Image (cartoon, rainbow, N blue to C red):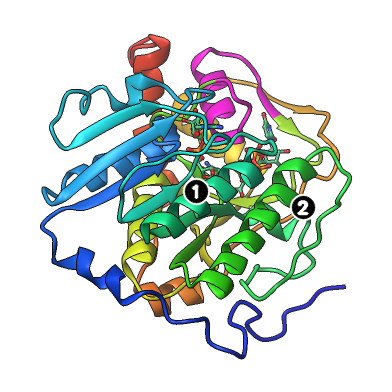
Amino acid sequence: MAQSNGDHSSAAKPPPTPSPLRFSKFFQSNMRILVTGGAGFIGSHLVDKLMENEKNEVIVADNYFTGSKDNLKKWIGHPRFELIRHDVTEPLLVEVDQIYHLACPASPTNVIGTLNMLGLAKRVGARILLTSTSEVYGDPLIHPQEESYWGNVNPIGVRSCYDEGKRVAETLMFDYHRQHGIEIRIARIFNTYGPRMNIDDGRVVSNFIAQALRNEPLTVQAPGTQTRSFCYVSDMVDGLIKLMEGENTGPINIGNPGEFTMIELAENVKELINPKVEIKMVENTPDDPRQRKPDISKARELLKWEPKIKLKDGLPLMEEDFRLRLGVPRNN
Ligand SMILES: NC(=O)c1ccc[n+]([C@@H]2O[C@H](COP(=O)([O-])OP(=O)(O)OC[C@H]3O[C@@H](n4cnc5c(N)ncnc54)[C@H](O)[C@@H]3O)[C@@H](O)[C@H]2O)c1
Ligand SMILES: O=C(O)[C@H]1O[C@H](OP(=O)(O)OP(=O)(O)OC[C@H]2O[C@@H](n3ccc(=O)[nH]c3=O)[C@H](O)[C@@H]2O)[C@H](O)[C@@H](O)[C@@H]1O
Protein backbone atom coordinates (compact mmCIF):
# COMPACT_ATOMS: atom_id res chain seq x y z
CA MET A 1 0.00 0.00 0.00
CA ALA A 2 1.27 3.49 -0.80
CA GLN A 3 1.82 5.84 2.12
CA SER A 4 2.43 9.50 1.60
CA ASN A 5 1.34 10.74 4.96
CA GLY A 6 3.22 13.47 6.86
CA ASP A 7 6.94 13.65 7.45
CA HIS A 8 7.97 10.52 9.34
CA SER A 9 11.57 11.58 9.59
CA SER A 10 11.08 14.08 12.41
CA ALA A 11 9.87 12.36 15.58
CA ALA A 12 7.49 14.29 17.87
CA LYS A 13 10.17 14.50 20.59
CA PRO A 14 13.23 16.57 19.64
CA PRO A 15 16.57 14.70 19.76
CA PRO A 16 18.93 15.31 22.69
CA THR A 17 21.01 18.46 22.42
CA PRO A 18 24.47 17.64 21.05
CA SER A 19 27.54 18.57 23.07
CA PRO A 20 28.22 22.35 23.01
CA LEU A 21 31.85 21.44 22.23
CA ARG A 22 30.81 20.72 18.65
CA PHE A 23 30.53 24.47 17.98
CA SER A 24 34.16 25.06 18.89
CA LYS A 25 35.28 23.49 15.63
CA PHE A 26 33.61 26.21 13.57
CA PHE A 27 36.07 28.75 14.93
CA GLN A 28 39.00 26.83 13.53
CA SER A 29 40.32 28.01 10.21
CA ASN A 30 40.15 24.59 8.58
CA MET A 31 37.28 22.19 8.12
CA ARG A 32 38.58 18.63 8.12
CA ILE A 33 36.39 16.57 5.85
CA LEU A 34 36.39 12.81 5.34
CA VAL A 35 34.98 11.52 2.04
CA THR A 36 34.50 7.74 2.04
CA GLY A 37 34.28 6.41 -1.51
CA GLY A 38 36.05 9.58 -2.68
CA ALA A 39 37.91 7.74 -5.45
CA GLY A 40 34.59 6.87 -7.12
CA PHE A 41 32.45 8.71 -9.64
CA ILE A 42 30.40 11.10 -7.48
CA GLY A 43 33.00 11.11 -4.67
CA SER A 44 35.85 12.37 -6.84
CA HIS A 45 33.73 15.23 -8.22
CA LEU A 46 32.74 16.09 -4.66
CA VAL A 47 36.44 16.15 -3.67
CA ASP A 48 37.22 18.51 -6.59
CA LYS A 49 34.56 20.92 -5.35
CA LEU A 50 35.54 20.69 -1.67
CA MET A 51 39.23 21.26 -2.52
CA GLU A 52 38.33 24.56 -4.23
CA ASN A 53 37.75 25.99 -0.74
CA GLU A 54 41.16 26.73 0.76
CA LYS A 55 39.84 26.29 4.29
CA ASN A 56 39.01 22.65 3.66
CA GLU A 57 41.31 19.72 4.36
CA VAL A 58 40.05 16.60 2.61
CA ILE A 59 40.77 12.99 3.56
CA VAL A 60 39.58 10.26 1.20
CA ALA A 61 39.14 6.69 2.43
CA ASP A 62 38.58 4.21 -0.38
CA ASN A 63 39.41 0.55 -1.03
CA TYR A 64 39.37 1.04 -4.85
CA PHE A 65 36.68 -1.62 -5.20
CA THR A 66 35.04 0.34 -8.04
CA GLY A 67 36.90 3.64 -7.72
CA SER A 68 40.39 4.58 -8.91
CA LYS A 69 43.33 6.72 -7.79
CA ASP A 70 43.27 8.12 -11.30
CA ASN A 71 40.10 10.06 -10.46
CA LEU A 72 42.06 11.92 -7.77
CA LYS A 73 45.44 12.24 -9.45
CA LYS A 74 45.38 16.04 -9.49
CA TRP A 75 45.17 16.14 -5.67
CA ILE A 76 47.72 13.47 -4.74
CA GLY A 77 50.61 15.28 -3.02
CA HIS A 78 48.54 18.42 -2.29
CA PRO A 79 49.15 19.64 1.30
CA ARG A 80 45.42 19.84 2.08
CA PHE A 81 44.68 16.36 0.69
CA GLU A 82 45.22 12.85 2.00
CA LEU A 83 44.32 9.51 0.42
CA ILE A 84 43.97 6.40 2.58
CA ARG A 85 43.47 2.88 1.25
CA HIS A 86 40.84 1.69 3.67
CA ASP A 87 37.84 -0.62 3.69
CA VAL A 88 34.98 0.99 5.63
CA THR A 89 33.86 -2.37 6.93
CA GLU A 90 36.86 -1.91 9.27
CA PRO A 91 36.76 0.91 11.83
CA LEU A 92 38.64 4.09 10.96
CA LEU A 93 40.05 6.56 13.47
CA VAL A 94 40.69 10.07 12.12
CA GLU A 95 40.00 13.54 13.51
CA VAL A 96 37.41 15.19 11.26
CA ASP A 97 34.53 17.68 11.40
CA GLN A 98 32.42 16.35 8.55
CA ILE A 99 31.97 12.93 6.98
CA TYR A 100 30.54 12.45 3.50
CA HIS A 101 29.84 8.72 3.51
CA LEU A 102 29.65 7.50 -0.09
CA ALA A 103 31.62 4.23 0.05
CA CYS A 104 29.38 1.43 -1.08
CA PRO A 105 29.14 -1.34 -3.61
CA ALA A 106 25.80 -3.13 -3.85
CA SER A 107 26.50 -5.27 -0.79
CA PRO A 108 26.17 -5.40 3.00
CA THR A 109 28.93 -2.79 3.17
CA ASN A 110 26.07 -0.33 3.44
CA VAL A 111 25.29 -1.52 6.91
CA ILE A 112 28.70 -2.29 8.37
CA GLY A 113 30.41 0.68 6.72
CA THR A 114 27.68 3.05 7.87
CA LEU A 115 27.87 1.68 11.40
CA ASN A 116 31.62 2.29 11.45
CA MET A 117 31.25 5.83 10.10
CA LEU A 118 28.53 6.60 12.66
CA GLY A 119 30.86 5.32 15.37
CA LEU A 120 33.53 7.68 14.10
CA ALA A 121 31.08 10.61 13.92
CA LYS A 122 30.04 9.93 17.52
CA ARG A 123 33.60 9.66 18.75
CA VAL A 124 34.88 12.87 17.16
CA GLY A 125 31.62 14.88 17.08
CA ALA A 126 31.53 15.10 13.28
CA ARG A 127 28.49 15.79 11.15
CA ILE A 128 27.81 12.85 8.82
CA LEU A 129 26.07 12.74 5.44
CA LEU A 130 24.89 9.44 3.95
CA THR A 131 24.39 9.09 0.21
CA SER A 132 21.22 7.04 0.19
CA THR A 133 19.30 6.31 -2.96
CA SER A 134 15.99 6.55 -4.77
CA GLU A 135 16.09 2.74 -4.64
CA VAL A 136 14.68 3.02 -1.10
CA TYR A 137 11.34 3.70 -2.86
CA GLY A 138 11.64 0.34 -4.67
CA ASP A 139 9.09 -0.02 -7.47
CA PRO A 140 7.17 3.06 -6.32
CA LEU A 141 3.40 3.16 -6.11
CA ILE A 142 3.30 6.94 -5.95
CA HIS A 143 4.68 9.24 -8.60
CA PRO A 144 6.72 11.43 -8.39
CA GLN A 145 8.36 10.16 -5.21
CA GLU A 146 8.32 12.45 -2.19
CA GLU A 147 10.40 11.82 0.92
CA SER A 148 7.43 10.87 3.10
CA TYR A 149 6.71 7.82 0.91
CA TRP A 150 7.88 4.61 2.63
CA GLY A 151 8.55 2.70 -0.55
CA ASN A 152 7.70 -0.62 -2.16
CA VAL A 153 10.76 -2.86 -1.92
CA ASN A 154 10.85 -6.64 -2.43
CA PRO A 155 12.92 -7.76 0.59
CA ILE A 156 14.11 -11.00 -1.03
CA GLY A 157 14.61 -9.88 -4.63
CA VAL A 158 17.85 -9.69 -6.63
CA ARG A 159 18.25 -5.94 -5.99
CA SER A 160 17.20 -6.01 -2.35
CA CYS A 161 20.70 -6.29 -0.88
CA TYR A 162 21.40 -2.77 -2.13
CA ASP A 163 17.93 -1.31 -1.50
CA GLU A 164 17.46 -2.80 1.95
CA GLY A 165 21.08 -2.08 2.84
CA LYS A 166 20.48 1.61 2.21
CA ARG A 167 17.18 1.48 4.10
CA VAL A 168 18.95 0.00 7.12
CA ALA A 169 21.71 2.62 6.73
CA GLU A 170 19.04 5.35 6.95
CA THR A 171 17.58 3.67 10.04
CA LEU A 172 20.98 3.56 11.73
CA MET A 173 21.57 7.23 10.92
CA PHE A 174 18.31 8.23 12.61
CA ASP A 175 18.89 5.95 15.61
CA TYR A 176 22.31 7.53 16.23
CA HIS A 177 20.75 10.96 15.78
CA ARG A 178 17.97 10.28 18.29
CA GLN A 179 20.05 8.39 20.82
CA HIS A 180 23.39 10.17 20.66
CA GLY A 181 22.54 13.56 19.15
CA ILE A 182 24.81 12.96 16.14
CA GLU A 183 24.31 15.57 13.43
CA ILE A 184 23.11 13.63 10.42
CA ARG A 185 22.24 14.42 6.81
CA ILE A 186 20.61 11.96 4.40
CA ALA A 187 20.57 12.53 0.65
CA ARG A 188 18.37 10.28 -1.49
CA ILE A 189 20.29 10.39 -4.73
CA PHE A 190 18.46 9.78 -8.01
CA ASN A 191 20.31 8.39 -11.06
CA THR A 192 23.41 10.51 -11.57
CA TYR A 193 25.60 10.63 -14.67
CA GLY A 194 28.65 12.46 -15.93
CA PRO A 195 32.38 12.20 -16.68
CA ARG A 196 34.34 9.50 -14.77
CA MET A 197 31.43 7.07 -14.60
CA ASN A 198 32.66 3.51 -14.80
CA ILE A 199 32.56 2.56 -18.46
CA ASP A 200 31.42 -1.03 -18.03
CA ASP A 201 29.48 -1.22 -14.77
CA GLY A 202 26.17 -1.65 -16.57
CA ARG A 203 24.39 1.59 -15.69
CA VAL A 204 22.23 2.80 -18.48
CA VAL A 205 23.77 6.17 -19.46
CA SER A 206 27.33 4.82 -19.46
CA ASN A 207 26.20 1.71 -21.35
CA PHE A 208 24.45 3.67 -24.10
CA ILE A 209 27.27 6.20 -24.58
CA ALA A 210 29.95 3.48 -24.70
CA GLN A 211 27.83 1.38 -27.09
CA ALA A 212 27.20 4.34 -29.40
CA LEU A 213 30.92 5.16 -29.50
CA ARG A 214 31.86 1.53 -30.14
CA ASN A 215 29.22 1.28 -32.86
CA GLU A 216 27.40 -1.48 -30.96
CA PRO A 217 23.59 -1.69 -30.62
CA LEU A 218 22.10 0.30 -27.73
CA THR A 219 20.63 -2.35 -25.40
CA VAL A 220 17.24 -1.13 -24.18
CA GLN A 221 15.98 -3.52 -21.51
CA ALA A 222 12.33 -4.46 -22.01
CA PRO A 223 9.82 -2.93 -22.05
CA GLY A 224 11.78 0.32 -22.56
CA THR A 225 8.87 2.39 -21.27
CA GLN A 226 10.29 2.34 -17.72
CA THR A 227 11.42 5.82 -16.70
CA ARG A 228 14.35 7.39 -14.88
CA SER A 229 15.31 10.97 -14.05
CA PHE A 230 18.97 11.75 -14.68
CA CYS A 231 20.97 14.31 -12.69
CA TYR A 232 24.29 15.71 -13.91
CA VAL A 233 27.10 15.13 -11.41
CA SER A 234 28.02 18.80 -10.79
CA ASP A 235 24.40 19.53 -9.81
CA MET A 236 24.49 16.49 -7.52
CA VAL A 237 27.69 17.63 -5.79
CA ASP A 238 26.24 21.14 -5.23
CA GLY A 239 23.14 19.56 -3.68
CA LEU A 240 25.19 17.32 -1.38
CA ILE A 241 27.30 20.24 -0.14
CA LYS A 242 24.21 22.40 0.47
CA LEU A 243 22.65 19.57 2.45
CA MET A 244 25.81 19.08 4.52
CA GLU A 245 26.14 22.81 5.22
CA GLY A 246 22.44 23.41 5.98
CA GLU A 247 20.34 22.70 9.05
CA ASN A 248 18.09 19.91 7.78
CA THR A 249 18.68 16.24 8.50
CA GLY A 250 16.69 15.06 5.48
CA PRO A 251 16.07 12.61 4.01
CA ILE A 252 16.00 14.93 1.02
CA ASN A 253 15.68 13.86 -2.60
CA ILE A 254 18.53 15.16 -4.73
CA GLY A 255 17.88 14.55 -8.39
CA ASN A 256 16.67 16.06 -11.62
CA PRO A 257 12.91 15.79 -12.18
CA GLY A 258 13.27 15.60 -15.97
CA GLU A 259 11.84 12.13 -16.65
CA PHE A 260 12.71 9.93 -19.66
CA THR A 261 11.79 6.45 -20.84
CA MET A 262 14.76 4.24 -21.68
CA ILE A 263 13.67 4.33 -25.33
CA GLU A 264 13.78 8.14 -25.24
CA LEU A 265 17.22 8.05 -23.63
CA ALA A 266 18.49 5.65 -26.31
CA GLU A 267 17.09 7.93 -29.03
CA ASN A 268 18.75 10.96 -27.47
CA VAL A 269 22.13 9.20 -27.33
CA LYS A 270 21.75 7.89 -30.87
CA GLU A 271 20.94 11.33 -32.25
CA LEU A 272 23.79 12.97 -30.34
CA ILE A 273 26.58 10.46 -30.89
CA ASN A 274 25.89 8.00 -33.68
CA PRO A 275 22.72 8.35 -35.80
CA LYS A 276 23.54 5.06 -37.57
CA VAL A 277 23.59 2.91 -34.44
CA GLU A 278 20.88 0.29 -33.89
CA ILE A 279 18.55 0.26 -30.86
CA LYS A 280 17.96 -3.32 -29.67
CA MET A 281 15.38 -4.55 -27.13
CA VAL A 282 16.90 -7.04 -24.66
CA GLU A 283 15.69 -8.93 -21.57
CA ASN A 284 15.43 -7.04 -18.28
CA THR A 285 16.37 -8.08 -14.74
CA PRO A 286 13.61 -8.80 -12.17
CA ASP A 287 12.07 -6.05 -10.01
CA ASP A 288 13.23 -3.22 -12.26
CA PRO A 289 11.35 -0.09 -11.05
CA ARG A 290 8.84 0.97 -13.70
CA GLN A 291 8.98 4.67 -13.00
CA ARG A 292 11.17 7.04 -11.07
CA LYS A 293 11.06 10.80 -10.71
CA PRO A 294 12.00 12.85 -7.67
CA ASP A 295 9.70 15.36 -6.06
CA ILE A 296 12.32 17.98 -5.19
CA SER A 297 10.04 20.50 -3.41
CA LYS A 298 11.95 19.92 -0.16
CA ALA A 299 15.35 20.51 -1.77
CA ARG A 300 14.05 23.66 -3.43
CA GLU A 301 12.53 25.01 -0.26
CA LEU A 302 15.00 23.90 2.42
CA LEU A 303 18.29 23.89 0.49
CA LYS A 304 17.44 26.51 -2.14
CA TRP A 305 18.78 23.94 -4.58
CA GLU A 306 17.62 22.77 -7.95
CA PRO A 307 19.49 21.17 -10.84
CA LYS A 308 20.69 23.44 -13.66
CA ILE A 309 21.90 21.02 -16.32
CA LYS A 310 19.39 19.41 -18.65
CA LEU A 311 20.03 15.92 -20.04
CA LYS A 312 20.61 17.30 -23.56
CA ASP A 313 23.38 19.55 -22.21
CA GLY A 314 24.92 16.99 -19.85
CA LEU A 315 25.21 14.10 -22.32
CA PRO A 316 27.73 15.92 -24.60
CA LEU A 317 29.96 16.64 -21.57
CA MET A 318 29.98 12.95 -20.76
CA GLU A 319 30.54 12.04 -24.41
CA GLU A 320 33.79 14.07 -24.41
CA ASP A 321 35.13 12.16 -21.40
CA PHE A 322 34.13 8.77 -22.83
CA ARG A 323 35.72 9.60 -26.21
CA LEU A 324 39.01 10.33 -24.46
CA ARG A 325 38.91 7.22 -22.29
CA LEU A 326 37.80 4.90 -25.11
CA GLY A 327 40.17 6.49 -27.63
CA VAL A 328 37.42 7.39 -30.12
CA PRO A 329 38.17 10.86 -31.53
CA ARG A 330 35.25 12.94 -32.81
CA ASN A 331 36.09 12.78 -36.53
CA ASN A 332 35.95 8.96 -36.70
N1 LIG B 1 25.54 7.15 -9.25
C1 LIG B 1 24.25 7.08 -8.93
O1 LIG B 1 23.38 7.21 -9.80
C2 LIG B 1 23.82 6.88 -7.51
C3 LIG B 1 22.45 6.87 -7.25
C4 LIG B 1 22.02 6.71 -5.94
C5 LIG B 1 22.93 6.57 -4.90
N2 LIG B 1 24.26 6.57 -5.19
C6 LIG B 1 25.19 6.41 -4.07
O2 LIG B 1 26.23 7.38 -4.17
C7 LIG B 1 27.47 6.83 -3.68
C8 LIG B 1 28.57 6.97 -4.74
O3 LIG B 1 28.16 6.30 -5.91
P1 LIG B 1 29.02 6.35 -7.26
O4 LIG B 1 28.05 6.33 -8.38
O5 LIG B 1 30.02 7.43 -7.19
O6 LIG B 1 29.69 4.91 -7.22
P2 LIG B 1 31.24 4.46 -7.34
O7 LIG B 1 31.24 2.97 -7.38
O8 LIG B 1 31.91 5.20 -8.44
O9 LIG B 1 31.85 4.96 -5.96
C9 LIG B 1 31.84 4.21 -4.78
C10 LIG B 1 33.23 4.29 -4.17
O10 LIG B 1 33.23 3.58 -2.92
C11 LIG B 1 34.39 2.77 -2.87
N3 LIG B 1 34.09 1.65 -1.97
C12 LIG B 1 33.22 0.62 -2.17
N4 LIG B 1 33.22 -0.21 -1.12
C13 LIG B 1 34.10 0.31 -0.22
C14 LIG B 1 34.54 -0.10 1.06
N5 LIG B 1 34.08 -1.21 1.66
N6 LIG B 1 35.47 0.67 1.70
C15 LIG B 1 35.96 1.79 1.11
N7 LIG B 1 35.58 2.22 -0.10
C16 LIG B 1 34.66 1.49 -0.76
C17 LIG B 1 34.66 2.37 -4.30
O11 LIG B 1 36.00 1.96 -4.53
C18 LIG B 1 34.31 3.66 -5.04
O12 LIG B 1 35.43 4.52 -5.13
C19 LIG B 1 27.15 5.38 -3.29
O13 LIG B 1 26.88 5.36 -1.90
C20 LIG B 1 25.90 5.06 -4.07
O14 LIG B 1 25.13 4.07 -3.43
C21 LIG B 1 24.73 6.71 -6.47
O1 LIG C 1 19.59 6.30 -8.75
C1 LIG C 1 19.48 5.33 -8.03
O2 LIG C 1 18.89 5.40 -6.96
C2 LIG C 1 20.07 4.02 -8.44
O3 LIG C 1 20.24 4.04 -9.83
C3 LIG C 1 20.78 2.93 -10.40
O4 LIG C 1 19.84 1.88 -10.46
P1 LIG C 1 18.91 1.87 -11.75
O5 LIG C 1 17.96 3.00 -11.72
O6 LIG C 1 18.33 0.53 -11.96
O7 LIG C 1 19.95 2.26 -12.89
P2 LIG C 1 20.48 1.51 -14.17
O8 LIG C 1 21.10 0.21 -13.88
O9 LIG C 1 21.28 2.53 -14.88
O10 LIG C 1 19.14 1.22 -14.99
C4 LIG C 1 18.22 2.23 -15.34
C5 LIG C 1 17.21 1.70 -16.33
O11 LIG C 1 17.88 1.47 -17.55
C6 LIG C 1 17.60 0.19 -18.04
N1 LIG C 1 18.80 -0.26 -18.79
C7 LIG C 1 19.99 -0.47 -18.17
C8 LIG C 1 21.10 -0.82 -18.88
C9 LIG C 1 20.99 -1.02 -20.27
O12 LIG C 1 21.97 -1.37 -20.99
N2 LIG C 1 19.79 -0.82 -20.85
C10 LIG C 1 18.70 -0.43 -20.16
O13 LIG C 1 17.62 -0.26 -20.75
C11 LIG C 1 17.26 -0.65 -16.82
O14 LIG C 1 16.38 -1.71 -17.17
C12 LIG C 1 16.57 0.38 -15.95
O15 LIG C 1 15.21 0.43 -16.26
C13 LIG C 1 22.10 2.56 -9.77
O16 LIG C 1 22.55 1.34 -10.26
C14 LIG C 1 22.02 2.55 -8.29
O17 LIG C 1 23.34 2.49 -7.79
C15 LIG C 1 21.40 3.80 -7.79
O18 LIG C 1 21.23 3.75 -6.42
Magenta extent? 200-219
Q: In the drawing, does residue 7 fall left or right of residue 86?
A: right
**Residue at coordinates 28% horizontally, 71% vertically from top-left?**
21
**Residue at coordinates 50% horizontally, 45% vertically from top-left?**
192
Q: What residue type is labelled 2?
A: Arg
Q: What residue type is labelled 1?
A: Met
| Label tally | 2
Residue 216 x, y percent position in the rendering: 61, 14
**Residue at coordinates 26% horizontally, 41% vertically from top-left?**
58
Picture layout, residue 119 above or below residue 214: below
Disc 2 marks which residue?
290
Relative depth, front residue between 306 and 320: 306
Residue 207 on the magenta segment: yes
Helix or strand or loop: what does disc 2 sit on?
Answer: loop
Picture layout, residue 70 above or below residue 283: above
Find residue 124 and report its image quarter.
bottom left
Q: Are marks 2 and 1 in contact (CB under 8 Å)?
A: no
Disc 1 marks which residue?
117
Picture layout, residue 19 above or below residue 137: below
Ligand number 2: quarter of image = top right
Find residue 262 and report its image quarter.
top right
Residue 279 visible in the current orientation: yes
Residue 196 x, y percent position in the rendering: 40, 28
Within 10 Å of disc 1 (Cα), the crowding (few <14, some 14-19, many 20+) is many
Q: Distance between the residues labelled 2 and 1?
A: 33 Å
